[in-house]
Amino acid sequence: MIFLFMGKYPCIKLNSGIKIANFSSPHRYKFHTGEELMACEDEVANDMKLNENHYYYQQKGWEDVEIRYELSDKIYDDLLELSSEDGIDIILVPYPVMNCVKESALKVGGASTFDGIQSILNKIRVCKLDDRVTKVIRSDKFCK
């Protein structure tokens, strides 16, 4: 069963009963069981990009670029709403999003913000590749 949550995040109920949402990936997820989770629309993927800060360091013949990511309020709000939904077990996010949420957990000041971050961390996961070449992912193993 495939549906859209909040009108923009594709969700699937796998044969195993696990309900998974795609948060912001413009690529579909193909599970090792043959099941597929739809991609987000391009507009959603672009709208849910992390804020980027670029730092440039000139080297001998090239330039190194350091990228530091930050969560936008929009991303935080949508992740919070998704994480509070009982009908979703796992929210698949890109690794940089997972990393930003974890970093945010270390910086929070108020109890409500901490509770919100914890709620998000309880459900977000990064996909675990089953096959690196075909990009098939596991439906029973996720990275936290």
Image (tube, rainbow, N blue to C red):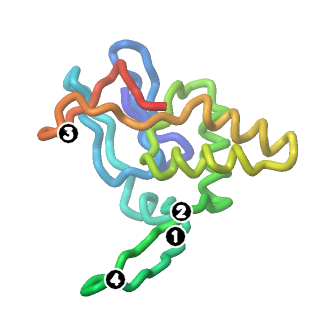
**Residue, disc 2:** 69
- Mark 3 neighbour class, 10 Å CA radius: few under 14, some 14 to 19, many 20 or more: some
Three-letter amino acid code at disc 1? Glu
**Residue, disc 3:** 135
Three-letter amino acid code at disc 2? Tyr
Separation of disc 3 and disc 1 at Cα?
26 Å
- Front one among 96 and 14: 96
Three-letter amino acid code at disc 4? Gln
The mark nearer the N terminus, 3 or 1, is 1
Q: Position of residue 135 (x, y in %)?
A: 20, 39
The mark nearer the N terminus, 4 or 1, is 1
Q: Position of residue 138 (x, y in %)?
A: 29, 25
Q: Tell me the tag on residue 59.
A: 4
Mark 3, secondary structure of its residue = loop
The mark nearer the N terminus, 1 or 2, is 1
The mark nearer the N terminus, 4 or 3, is 4
Please tell me whether residue 40 is drawn above or below residue 81 in the rendered image: below
Please tell me whether residue 69 is drawn above or below residue 86 in the rendered image: below
